[in-house]
Amino acid sequence: NAIEPLKSALLINPKYDKAYEALGEAYQNLKDHKKALQAFQNLAKIKYRDPAAHFKLGQAYANLGQIPRAIETFKEAVRWNPDYAAAYFKIAWLYGKIKQYPEALKNYGEAVRVQPKNSRAYFNMGKIHEQMKKYNLAADAYKQVLRINPKHKSAHKRLGGNYLKLKWYEPARDELKKAVAINPKSAEAQYNLGLAFIELQQHKEAIAPLTA
């Protein structure tokens, strides 16, 4: 049991930052998020200039569902390190959870500024644009995902779906063919491919995906 010796270390040296960090991680692994929060709060007080300490504290708040506190704590991390891509990603994801979409997009934008090949950030940007019914911007985000990872099956499926919503039926068909080739068991991709064929008056071709 790692917890007791870590507590003993802190009794000997109450400012032992590594012990607080290890204790927080131990409690986190045990899903005892309240005690993990207490440990990371102490860590962040001692290492208040350390963006990683604020990141760990932000994650502890997020684990407890304290989203506004988590966001502010992750923001403290990026104040100390303006190129902290993981913190921008967390801020964006949390803003997305509470449907503050412009703030989410702004922070995903910061994440890809620091990490231009962060396909997860681009993918989540696409999903947010879809929620906002900005299908052309969603399509642009999914194209960025595919630039980074050409075999990303969900990006092909979502890009094709957005082309359908934009009534761009030929590119929709082409993307959905790729999605089905990568993942033939995707009912959504098969269905949308069938719709694209129907809109293109290619009724015979629509039968296979619709009955797959």
Image (cartoon, grey):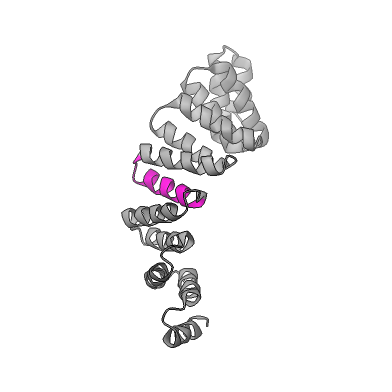
The tally of labels here is: 0
Residue appearing at x 48%, y 61% in the figure:
52
Figure quadrant of the C terminus: top right
- Whether residue 78 appears in magenta in the rendering, the answer is no
Q: Is residue 118 visible?
A: yes
Q: Is residue 183 visible?
A: no
On the rendered structure, is 211 left or right of 64? right
| Whether residue 33 is situated above or below residue 198 in the rendered picture | below
- Whether residue 88 appears in magenta in the rendering, the answer is yes
Residue appearing at x 47%, y 24% in the figure:
136
Magenta highlight range: 86-100
| Whether residue 37 is situated above or below residue 103 in the rendered picture | below
x then y, percent, for residue 103: 37, 40
Q: Residue furthest top?
A: 201
Query: Looking at the rendering, which quadrant does residue 143 occupy?
Result: top right
On the rendered structure, is 110 left or right of 186? left
